[in-house]
Amino acid sequence: MKAAAGVLVLLLACPAFAAREKKIDPQPKQRAHEKAVTLDVKDEEARSVLKSIQQQCGIRNLILDPDLQGKATFYFRDVPCHTAFDTVLKTYGLKAVVDSDTVTTVERIH
């Protein structure tokens, strides 16, 4: 009986395979062709931030709601365009409506 118990302990102490360590990158790699946004602004008007994103992301036509207002602070470094745009919209309480492939309208959420 003692021999069987010794074998059991040995089997438990020596795993069949070694665990592999997986490193998680805190910032996902962006695709080479995907444009990115870099912003470092404090208490910046919504119109100014959206204009900067338009230029950096190559948005051809951006129509802004006349009632658009508000200030916010953003520190982005190489953030993918869609992520930066969505984050800015949520922060200011806005939504984007894509009217066509070349026209995007930004308006307040009612």
Image (spheres, rainbow, N blue to C red):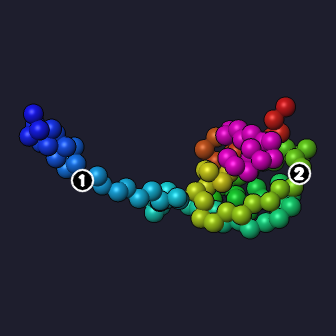
- What's under tag 1, amino acid-wise? Ala
Question: Residue 66, position in %: x, y?
Answer: 89, 45
Question: Residue 11, position in %: x, y?
Answer: 16, 44
Q: Pick whichever, 18 or 26, lies toward us.
A: 18
> Residue at horizontal 45%, vertical 63%?
32
> Residue at horizontal 58%, vertical 57%?
80
Instruction: Say which residue label 1 marks.
Output: 18
Instruction: Say which residue label 2 marks.
Output: 70
Look at the image and give the residue range highlighted in magenta.
86-99
Q: Residue furthest front?
A: 2
Secondary structure beneath dot 2 equals loop
Q: Pick whichever, 75 or 31, lies toward us.
A: 75
Position of 75 relative to 12 (above/below): below
Say which mark, if any, is on residue 78: none
Q: Residue furthest top?
A: 110
Q: Residues within 10 Å of mark 2 (few under 14, many from 20)?
A: few
Sequence order check, earlier mark of 2 and 1: 1
25 sits left or right of 5 in the view: right
